[in-house]
C-alpha cells in the first residue's frame, strides 16, 4: 500500500476521533481549552523545529509583511474554528460539527470560484447545488440555520484558502499561527490562575495531563496529513477526507446518543449524495486526465 494513503488515513482518523479527547476535558470551558491547545501546540511544534534545526523560514519572513498579515488572519480563523468545534463537542452537537466537515469540500469549490477564479466542472456545481439543498432542508426542519456547521465549514474553508496561497509548510505555518495566538492565550491563562480560576488551579492531575497532550494531538495529525498529501493524488485525498466527519457522525449518534430526528436524515442524505457526486466526478476527471497523459506520452515516444 502507498504509505501516503496510510499517513493521510491516520490523520483523518485522528481528527475524526477528536470528540473523544474533548469529552475528557468537558469540565473545562471551551475558551480555556483553546488557550491550552494554543500554548502546548506552540511548545510541541517549536520542540520539533529545534530537533530538526528548521529556523530559516523565520528569517525569511521579516521582509514579507503581507505574508505575516495573512498568517495573522489565518490564526484568527483557526482559533475561531477550534473554539466553535470544542464548544460543539462539549454541548452535545457532534453531529452538527460533522455536518460542517461534510460540506467543507463543497465550500472549497465555491471559494475557489469566487477568490481564485477557478472554473468548477458541471459535476462539481451539481454537487454544490445538491448540498445547498440539504443545508436548506435542515434549516427548514429545525427552524434555524445550522450555524455550527456553517461556521466550521466557512472558517476552515477561508483558512484553507489563505494557507493555499501561503509560502510556509504545514509545520512552519502552525508554528507561526500559534506564535501569533500564544501571547493572548498565556495572558488569559495567567489572569484566570491569578483569580483562582482555571484548570491549572482547580483541575485534577488527569485533567491537567489531558490539556498538556493537546500539543501533540494537534500537531501530529497535521504532520501526517502533510506527509500523505505529498505522496498521493488530490483525488485520493478527496475520498479519504470523509473519514473524519463520518467518524464524528458515528460518535455523535451511536456513542454520545445525540438526538437525530428522522426528518434530519433527509438533509444528510442530500449532502452525502452531493459528496458521492463530487467524489465520482473528481475520480472520473482524474482518470480521464491520466488516460490523456498516457496517450500523449505514447505519441511523443512513437
Image (cartoon, grey):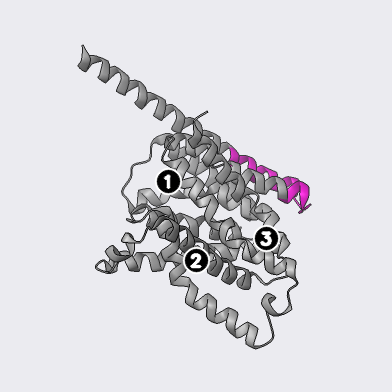
**Residue 34 lies in what quarter of the image?**
bottom right
- Residue 109 x %, y %: 42, 46
Q: Give the vertical position of 113 relative to 302 (above or below).
A: below
CA distance separating discs 2 and 3: 19 Å
- Residue 157 x %, y %: 46, 54
| Quadrant (top left/top right/bottom left/bottom right) for the C terminus | top left
Give whichever of discs 1 and 2 has the lower sequence position.
Answer: 2
Which label number is shown at residue 42?
2
- Residue 198 x %, y %: 67, 78
**In this picture, which residue range is highlighted in magenta?**
252-272
Mark 1 vs mark 3: in front: 3
Q: Which residue is mark 3?
A: 22
What secondary structure is found at the residue carrying circle 2?
helix
Residue at point 70% right, 54% down? 20
Which label number is shown at residue 109?
1
Residue at point 38% right, 36% down? 121
Amino acid at each position: 500500500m502507498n504509505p501516503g494513503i496510510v499517513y493521510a488515513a491516520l490523520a483523518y482518523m485522528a481528527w475524526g476521533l477528536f470528540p473523544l479527547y474533548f469529552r475528557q476535558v468537558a469540565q473545562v470551558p471551551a475558551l480555556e481549552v483553546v488557550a491550552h491547545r494554543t500554548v502546548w501546540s506552540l511548545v510541541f511544534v517549536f520542540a520539533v523545529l529545534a530537533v530538526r534545526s528548521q529556523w530559516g523560514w523565520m528569517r525569511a519572513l521579516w521582509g514579507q509583511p503581507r505574508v505575516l498579515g495573512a498568517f495573522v488572519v489565518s490564526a484568527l480563523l483557526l482559533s475561531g474554528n477550534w473554539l466553535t468545534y470544542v464548544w460543539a463537542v462539549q454541548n452535545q452537537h457532534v453531529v452538527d460539527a460533522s455536518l460542517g466537515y461534510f460540506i467543507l469540500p463543497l465550500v472549497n469549490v465555491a471559494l475557489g470560484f469566487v477568490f481564485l477564479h477557478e472554473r468548477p466542472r458541471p459535476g462539481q456545481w451539481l454537487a454544490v447545488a445538491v448540498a445547498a439543498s440539504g443545508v436548506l432542508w435542515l434549516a427548514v426542519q429545525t427552524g434555524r440555520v445550522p450555524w455550527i456547521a456553517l461556521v466550521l465549514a466557512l472558517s476552515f474553508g477561508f483558512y484553507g484558502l489563505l494557507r493555499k496561497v501561503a509560502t510556509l509548510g504545514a509545520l512552519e505555518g502552525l508554528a507561526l499561527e500559534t506564535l501569533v495566538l500564544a501571547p493572548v492565550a498565556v495572558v488569559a491563562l495567567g489572569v484566570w490562575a491569578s483569580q483562582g480560576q482555571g484548570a491549572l488551579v482547580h483541575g485534577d492531575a488527569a485533567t491537567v495531563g489531558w490539556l498538556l497532550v493537546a500539543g501533540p494531538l494537534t500537531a501530529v495529525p497535521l504532520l501526517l496529513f502533510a506527509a500523505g498529501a505529498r505522496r498521493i493524488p488530490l483525488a485520493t485525498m478527496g475520498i479519504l477526507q470523509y473519514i473524519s466527519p463520518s467518524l464524528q457522525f458515528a460518535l455523535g449518534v451511536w456513542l454520545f446518543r445525540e438526538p437525530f430526528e428522522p426528518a434530519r436524515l433527509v438533509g444528510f442524505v442530500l449532502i452525502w449524495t452531493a459528496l458521492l457526486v463530487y467524489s465520482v466526478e473528481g475520480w472520473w476527471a482524474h482518470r480521464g486526465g491520466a488516460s490523456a497523459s498516457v496517450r500523449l506520452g505514447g505519441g511523443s515516444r512513437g
